[in-house]
Image: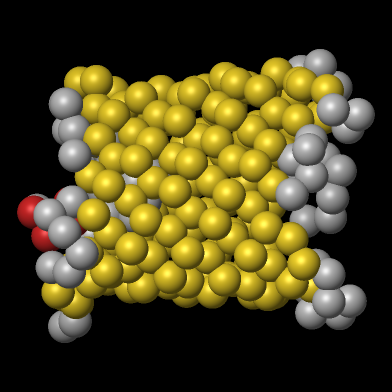
Amino acid sequence: MAALALAQPVSAGAWLKEKGAGLLSFSYEADRDRTYGSQWGYGSLYGEYGLTPKLTLGLDAGQGDDADDWKAILFLRFGSGIGWLPGRLATEFGAGATGAPGGLTEPVIRTGLSWGTGFTTPDGSGWINLDARTDTRPQSALVDYKLDITLGVMPNPRTQLTLELWGEDTATEPRTVKLSPAVSRRIGKGTWLRLGGIVGVHNDPSIGLVVGSRIEF
């Protein structure tokens, strides 16, 4: 159980934080278009704090290169067990704001459902986690759908290896799918550094790198 707790991804999905425990994470994604060579970046700030054993408070914020490419969402995640399915289940509800064309601000409502389970491999403890979310902008009646699937393994207490599949279907862009392999390395009691790659595999010609760090407390 202790090894699995260390093996959780940055966005822990179905695994809630223990009461009084939390994490704060920052990452930066640098991308390039494989066809035209254009470049862009996106910085993210993510945090979680355990209010109770079955309730986690979180923050999901980010800023891109464009002035209207930003978001800031506070959410609550509720956990529960599943009698007929192994693993954990969590529901998520959040609210915040996002950028809109013309430098405007638009409210956003988030709903989400996560499922995850741990397992043992010859190379160490592992996990799989599925996060499905919708971000609804009631002012413009637009809905963005996202599905993240994470497969991870922890070969030793200081190393995490992950492979993530990101699917996104937004109201203004074609449906896209990306792959992101990454390695995270613990450099202190609760501090991790992460280095990963990103490649678009469906309707996305981008390729890039993501670097990040997180502090667990």
Residue 211 vertical placement versus 91 (above, below): below
Q: Nearer the viewer, residue 84 or 41?
A: 41
Q: Is residue 101 left or right of residue 78?
A: right
- Is residue 160 visible in this depiction of the protein? yes
111 up-or-down from 130: above or below: above
In this rendering, the count of numbered labels is 0
Judge by depth and name the residue closer to the eye, 84 or 154. Answer: 154
Q: Tell me if residue 86 comes above or below residue 179 in the rendering.
A: above
The residue sitting at the bottom extreme is 122
**132 displayed left or right of 13:** right
In the picture as drawn, the residue positioned furthest to the left comes out as 2
Q: Position of residue 85 (x, y in %)?
A: 29, 47
Q: Quadrant of residue 133?
A: top right
Tell me residue 54's x, y (percent): 24, 25
Q: Residue at x 53, y 65 (%)?
A: 210
| Quarter-of-image position of residue 187 | bottom left
Judging depth in this view, the residue of 192 and 172 nearest the camera is 192
- 171 on left or right of 179: right
Quadrant assignment for the C terminus: top left
Query: Going 12% across and 60% down the picture, which residue do you hit?
Result: 3
Question: Is residue 164 visible in this depiction of the protein?
Answer: no
Identified at 34% across, 41% down, the residue is 24
Pinpoint residue 123: horizontal percent, then vertical percent: 19, 81
**Is 194 situated above or below 89?**
below
Residue 124 lies, in percent from the top left, at 16, 75
